[in-house]
Image (cartoon, coloured by chain):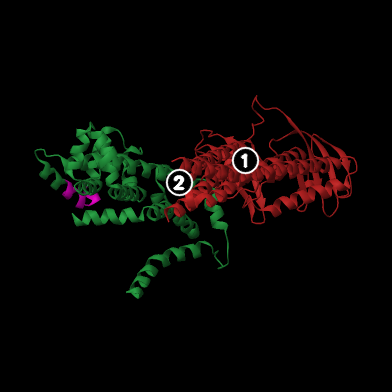
């Protein structure tokens, strides 16, 4: 078992180590920091795109967490006509490929006049159903008696959500936040479809357009791009595993 | 584990912010500065129109003609594109360049360094034909490592202030601004020699005066790293030191704002910038070695740069001294505040 774990770990880690080693080598095979200078000091375009992509991903994550918490609480704790049908529709949307909704989204965004803006990337990503599903499963584990006791103490619905239900389901919240951030960070098709100007593309898309005569610059950019997900996974490792396990149990 | 991850990535976040600010400044400083001239479409399709040969650049591969275009892809702004040799020729009768008609051309007249196909540029200077043009005066130091030619031909609108075996100090009037060594060397046949170096004293002094600002910048960059290192000691009992953490974050934010302010004030003259990397210190050393060698051979005029260098050294020493003192203050502040916090927390526990 240990050997299998070691092999699996090596398979996951070796590509990153290989990228790191290659990024420090010049064309003759010697050690050089020239490409790090190129990405981090010589030109600001790589880092500016990094910050733009980070801001966009943070907006997507924050928006999706908010929408998912509200919708998840409604599905978990309220009874209303068509609830099961709507939840079933949510599941269908969740398993549907992105490409199916790309054109309808394009038409709607065009009608709203949001094409060629960052709102075209952020708004559709906020309403992705995965977060709602995770939070619904997460909130179902909260006993109704706790909520009733809070209401008897004079809490309104928002207070119940913010002060009682959400803190009890930190792992679900973190899981939703993390997965939605990664979705936003790794956007590829939506920027190509909804944005016209190359200057507006996030780093996930622009990276593919780094000049072919500078492959090592692309490797250094890969290391730059991996930093936010690396931080989030390292910081929220425990909650992520709990959140996914909880969703799986239900 | 979480505290360690947050601690490590806080340093990475700070470094990314600083790299973004530095890269923006370095990119601006490293732009090739160009002067351009406009050649307008004359309306005669098929008939070539003429341009003077001032716009040609020569190297070992031959003559090159460059025009200004808008960049595409990753780059915003303007780039240089070489016009293919099949597109233009020099008319033997008129001695002028013939360009195909049918569109306007923005030709690169001179550059702060030899133009490179596809490089980003920034357009500077006011064309001489416009009403806004004001003649500029300067002092040029011409250095010949192998000795000044016996018959040194003076450029137009200039006079010799002083001359030695290896250097000529010139007073120049009505010259192009900013200074481009390539353009300056074309002012006289004597200055076109390969080994000859031409320096603008205005730009040399401007460059030296920026160096103390670099020392201040270095202190603003080092202080947050020092605060980060001190914060690492507090990591084990982070919940006790919340106020100190907030104070440290505040100090780092102030340092970042200070760094932005200093970077806004730094402005290096383009003629001293290296071709490849701004950290190519050998380029600066070579340039100032030529200047100091030339100035040491001049008796009366040679003292200016030497005095300025001494002044700069004193300023840097003062700045670094203040910076070292600031670092000590930060360390003492962290230790004192940590001890006050512990005492305060233990008193509260005792009272409870």
Q: Which residues are magenta?
A: A90-100
Judged by its main secondary structure, the magenta piece is helix
Q: Quadrant of the C terminus of chain B?
A: top left
Q: Chain of mark 2?
A: B
Q: Colour of chain A?
A: green
Give the residue drawn at x 41%, y 45%.
A54
Identify the chain drawn in red.
Answer: B
Where does the image place residue B105, in percent across and percent down from the top left? 55, 38
* Residue where numbered disc 1 is placed: B34
Q: Furthest-left residue in view?
A: A81
Q: Chain of mark 1?
A: B
A151 lies left or right of B329: left
A142 lies left or right of B108: left
Secondary structure category for the residue under label 1: strand
Front-most of A127 and A8? Answer: A8
CA neighbours of label 2 inside 10 A, class few (<14), some (14 to 19), many (20+): few
B183 lies left or right of B66: right
The residues bearing labels 2 and 1 have C-alpha atoms spaced at a distance of: 57 Å
Quarter of the image where one finds residue B52: top right
* Residue where numbered disc 2 is placed: B239
Q: Quadrant of the N terminus of chain B?
A: bottom left
Secondary structure category for the residue under label 2: helix
Front-most of B99 and B104? Answer: B104
Residue B287 seen anywhere in this rendered image of the structure: yes
Where does the image place residue A26, in percent across and percent down from the top left? 55, 64
Say which label, 2 or 1, has the lower sequence index.
1
């Amino acid at each position: 078992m240990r050997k299998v774990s070691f092999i699996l770990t090596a398979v996951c880690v070796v590509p990153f180590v290989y990228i790191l080693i290659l990024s420090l080598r010049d064309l003759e095979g010697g050690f050089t920091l020239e490409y790090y200078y190129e990405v981090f000091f010589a030109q600001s375009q790589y880092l500016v795109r990094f910050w733009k992509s980070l801001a966009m991903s943070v907006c997507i994550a924050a928006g999706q967490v908010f929408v998912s918490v509200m919708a998840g609480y409604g599905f978990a704790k309220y009874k209303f006509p068509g609830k099961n049908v709507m939840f079933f529709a949510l599941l269908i949307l969740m398993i549907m490929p992105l490409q199916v909704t790309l054109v309808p989204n394009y038409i709607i965004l065009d009608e709203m006049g949001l094409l060629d803006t960052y709102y075209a990337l952020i708004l559709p990503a906020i309403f992705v159903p995965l977060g709602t599903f995770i939070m619904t499963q997460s909130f179902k584990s909260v006993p109704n008696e706790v909520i009733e006791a809070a209401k008897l103490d004079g809490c309104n619905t928002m207070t119940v959500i913010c002060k009682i239900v959400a803190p009890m389901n930190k792992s679900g919240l973190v899981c939703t936040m993390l997965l939605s951030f990664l979705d936003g960070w790794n956007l590829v098709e939506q920027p190509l479809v909804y944005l016209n100007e190359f200057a507006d593309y996030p780093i996930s898309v622009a990276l593919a357009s780094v000049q072919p005569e500078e492959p090592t610059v692309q490797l250094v950019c890969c290391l730059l791009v991996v930093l936010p997900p690396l931080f989030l996974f390292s910081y929220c490792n425990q909650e992520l595993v709990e959140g996914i396990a909880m969703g799986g149990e239900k | 584990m979480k505290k360690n991850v947050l601690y490590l990535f806080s340093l990475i976040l700070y470094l990314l912010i600083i790299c973004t600010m530095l890269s923006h400044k370095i990119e601006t400083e490293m732009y090739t500065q160009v002067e351009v001239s406009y050649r307008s479409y004359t309306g005669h399709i098929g008939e070539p129109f003429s341009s003077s040969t001032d716009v040609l650049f020569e190297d070992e591969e031959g003559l090159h003609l460059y025009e200004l275009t808008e960049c595409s892809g990753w780059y915003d702004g303007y780039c240089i594109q070489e016009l293919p040799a099949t597109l233009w020729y020099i008319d033997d009768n008129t001695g002028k360049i013939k360009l195909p008609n049918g569109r306007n051309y923005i030709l690169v007249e001179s550059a702060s360094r030899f133009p490179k196909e596809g490089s980003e540029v920034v357009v500077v200077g006011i064309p001489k034909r416009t009403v806004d043009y004001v003649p500029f005066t300067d002092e040029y130091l011409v250095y010949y490592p192998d000795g000044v030619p016996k018959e040194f031909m003076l450029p137009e609108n200039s006079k010799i202030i002083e001359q030695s075996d290896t250097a000529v100090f010139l007073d120049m009037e009505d010259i192009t601004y900013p200074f481009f060594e390539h353009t300056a060397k074309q002012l006289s046949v004597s200055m076109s020699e390969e080994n000859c170096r031409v320096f603008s004293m205005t730009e040399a002094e401007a460059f030296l005066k920026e160096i103390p600002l670099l020392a201040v910048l270095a202190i603003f960059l080092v202080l947050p790293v020092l605060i980060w290192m001190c914060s690492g000691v507090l990591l084990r009992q982070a919940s006790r030191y919340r106020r100190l953490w907030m104070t440290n974050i505040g100090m780092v934010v102030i340092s970042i704002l200070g760094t932005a302010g200093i970077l806004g004030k730094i402005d290096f003259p383009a003629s001293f910038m290296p071709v490849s990397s701004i950290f190519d210190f050998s380029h600066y050393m070579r340039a100032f070695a030529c200047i100091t060698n030339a100035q040491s051979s001049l008796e009366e005029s040679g003292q200016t740069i030497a005095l300025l260098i001494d002044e700069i050294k004193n300023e840097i020493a003062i700045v670094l001294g203040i910076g070292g003192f600031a670092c000590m203050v930060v360390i003492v502040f962290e230790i004192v505040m940590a001890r006050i916090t512990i005492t305060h927390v233990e008193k509260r526990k005792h009272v409870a």
